[in-house]
Amino acid sequence: MQLRHMPAKTGYLWFCQGLWIFRINPIGFLMLIFLYILLVQVAFFFPELGLLFILIFTPGISLGFMAACRAALAQERPRLTLFIDSYRHYGSQTSKRLLGLGLIYTLAVLSISLITYLFIDFPVLALAITQQQAPSAEAMQQLYIAAIVVMVLYLPIMMVMWFAPLLIAWQHMSVIKALFFSWLACWHNRGAFMLYLILWAAALIVLPLAVDTLLLHFDLANIAGFIVTPYSIIMMAMLYCSFYATWKGCFQEITSHHDDVLPSP
């Protein structure tokens, strides 16, 4: 495996390649997304334990989706058991490392939640959310503070976790080594990742908000859900597919196959 250093414009390439991978087998990828959404909804029935379950198994879920991308590129159908296969297909040592990685991720997310709680006034924010009226200036300030704190704290966690499950399963690295090389790959390609994240923020946040606002302006808010919800689900699947594009862009696998090569737009 060799680490690549890509120019900033590669972020646009990764974005386009994610759309291209999704087009290979849209039904298969959407079924995996629906399965993930179902798992999250079931977890919500057990507020504390369910959330911990999702966080701990996030690396395995991510690895399963990347395996689906690799299978699609090899003209194979992604299996719905890929999330489970992450813990039984790669051997007991890899399973233990993935679980250890999940525990680290869980502790990091819980730590962010605790630190965020210390920075913002949750009663004011909760009151603004539950009231059927425009939020006050104080509530908006608390919301902005919370968003900034979470973004600043989560960014380094995102960097160390981005490629870690793949490095553990596909490159047989230890947890610490995988976290380090994941951070190194993201840092060396920070320009490309910045453009990549901006494009996906525009596709997943800005565009749906613009459509929602436009429909509200024309008194068509009742149909917003029929447009924005399917769009968001499809774009979420494309986003996961683009994760694989970032892997192929940042790392050169020595055993890579010709049918695993992604196109340039």
Image (cartoon, rainbow, N blue to C red):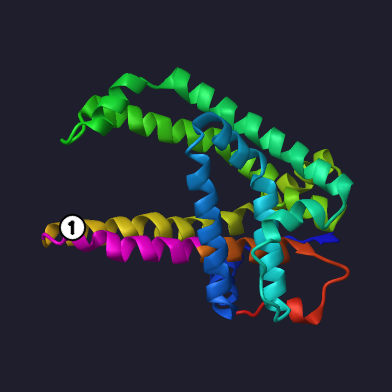
Q: Where does label 1 land, which residue?
A: 221
93 relative position to 260: left or right = right
Q: Is residue 11 visible?
A: no
- For the C terminus, the image quarter is bottom right
For residue 230: magenta?
yes
User: Looking at the image, which residue sits at the far left?
Assistant: 219
18 relative position to 172: left or right = left
Position in image of residue 217 (x %, y %):
13, 58
Position in image of residue 129 (x %, y %):
27, 33
Report the residue at 50% width, 60% height from top. 34
Q: Quadrant of residue 180?
A: top right
Q: Is residue 263 above or below residue 36?
A: below
Residue extent of the magenta highlight: 219-236
Q: Quadrant of residue 56?
A: top right
Q: Residues within 10 Å of mark 1 (few under 14, many from 20)?
A: some
- For the N terminus, the image quarter is bottom right
Position in image of residue 136 (x %, y %):
20, 29
Position in image of residue 231 (x %, y %):
38, 65
Q: How many marks?
A: 1
Q: Is residue 20 above or below residue 5?
A: below
Name the chief secondary structure element in magenta: helix
Report the residue at 15% width, 62% height from top. 220
- Look at label 1 and name its amino acid: Ala
